[in-house]
Image: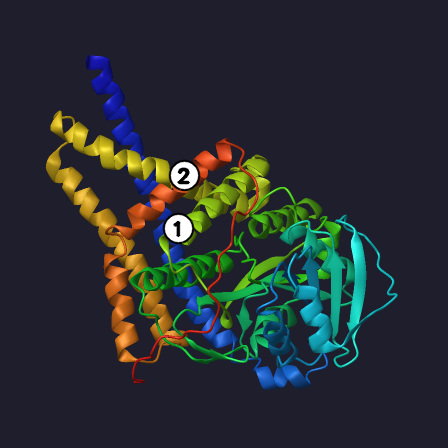
Amino acid sequence: MKYLEILLFASTVAIFVFYVLLQAFYCLLLLASFYGAWAQSRLKKLYLPQQLVQSPVTPPISILVPAHNEEATIRESVQALLGLNYPRFEVIVINDGSTDGTLAELIQSFSLRRAEIVYHPLLPTQPIRGIYVSLLEPRLTVIDKVGGGKSDALNAGINLSNSPWVCSLDADSILEEDALLRGIRPAIEDQRVAATCGIVRVANGCRVAAGRVLRVALPRSRLVVLQVVEYLRGFLGGRLGWSWLNGLVIISGAFGIFRTDVLRTIGGYSRETVGEDMEIVFRIHRHFRQIREPYRVVFVPDPVCWTQVPSDFSTLRRQRRRWQRGLAEVLAKHRSLFFRPAMGVVGCLAFPYFVLEFLAPVMEISGFILVPVAWALGLLDWNYTLLYLVLAFLLGVLFALWAVVIEEFTYRRYTSWRDLFRLLFFALFEHLGYHQMVLWWRLEGILDYFRKKRGWGEQVRSGFRHPAPVGQPR
């Protein structure tokens, strides 16, 4: 019994130490995001979108759109991309082994014709079946290839690109009209920039037509609003802070802009993980650190990509399990970077932080069980335990509220009082039930990793056809 009590006490202490370390990282990110929001608000005034359109230094961009069974939405998505406000760009759609009418829809809608285009397979991909160009729109090219997954499709697009920059974009995402201009701005300001990304926002509940978000509003679904809070905290509270520290290691697969030569040099996207968006950023950091060349990977909060998020529990569960499995795969592949001084902020801060995030489901769920047991056996002082739990909860609420505050006083996409109060309300209570549910799904994702589960699983998309009523503007 004595040894059991010692083990229980040691486990409880380890959980407390874990919480302290994680909360310390959150405080660091909060401070960094505060400065980052202030700095970005000043920098974005230096280069306005209309100035960048007319500037000769604005570089050409290739927009890469992997598409697998997107027949229902691909026409509208491509039309919206062709209408973006950017001086020189091309759209490369990669039909990755679709079994529906995706390719036929593109051929019919844009008068595609098969073309003999020189294709240099610098990055290995599944076989290319054909390359098509549009007779109506010279900026559109379509690659038809054997299915190999999203990473394989992006690598095919990188091979065909003739631009110094490429933008990876999900086929079901919506870019705001000036998102490319705002996203490329850091690269125009600073030649050290190797990659940039914008914010991904939740489109559920917004009024959407012809591939454009006409009015922004929160959805009725409580499950989706909780995800809105998560996205705001993850981007405005997390990535904004890591960007300022030059330790950003995640560029969302939904919207990222990269130097083409860098992607080709490091071998393109990995086909061995579902976390390809995080894995490639780690390799970018590793590449520049090894050649000892100054560089930056930047998050810019004002270019917006809108996307649909899961509106039901089963789809959300699959998504979070996949994200956790992808995190495990990336950390395992790049484990040599852990606390490696030569990797700077990435090795000494960002990597340890994501190790803690990976362990969070195990440690927090264990804490829910072990702490009450340890207190019942008299191994913990109840007053100190209660004080710590309250402080941990309040800090979690503070970080969520902080992201909503940044949103309100800087970018202010949600313009109705009703939406603002709903965001604040759900930020207050996100840690009561929803957070614990997501922890359990992430724990399942860890088990999926050790079971060597592969693939993305079934993807369910609801589309942009049923917007919820919006609140009254302030």
**Could you say which is closer to the camera, residue 207 or residue 438?**
207
Q: Position of residue 416 (x, y in %)?
A: 31, 80
Name the N-terminal-most of marks 1 and 2: 1
The N terminus - image quarter: top left
Q: Tags 1 and 2 in contact by the CB under 8 Å rule?
A: no
Q: Amino acid at mark 2?
A: Glu
Q: Secondary structure at mark 2?
A: helix
Q: How many badges with numbers are in the image?
A: 2
Q: Position of residue 238 (x, y in %)?
A: 42, 57
Query: Which residue in the structure is indicated by mark 2?
Result: 444
Residue at 55% x, 57% y is 251
Image position of 143 (left or right of 333): right
Q: Position of residue 227 (x, y in %)?
A: 37, 60
Real-space CA distance between mark 1 and mark 2, rounded to the nearest whole angstrom: 13 Å
**Could you say which is closer to the camera, residue 276 or residue 448?**
448
Image position of 435 (left or right of 203): left
Q: Amino acid at mark 1?
A: Ser
To which quarter of the image does residue 137 belong?
bottom right
Q: Position of residue 271 (x, y in %)?
A: 65, 45
Image position of 331 (left or right of 417): right
Q: Secondary structure at mark 1?
A: helix
**Could you say which is closer to the camera, residue 446 or residue 393?**
446
- Is residue 416 at all visible to an observer of this figure? yes
Residue at 77% x, 78% y is 138
Residue at 76% x, 77% y is 111
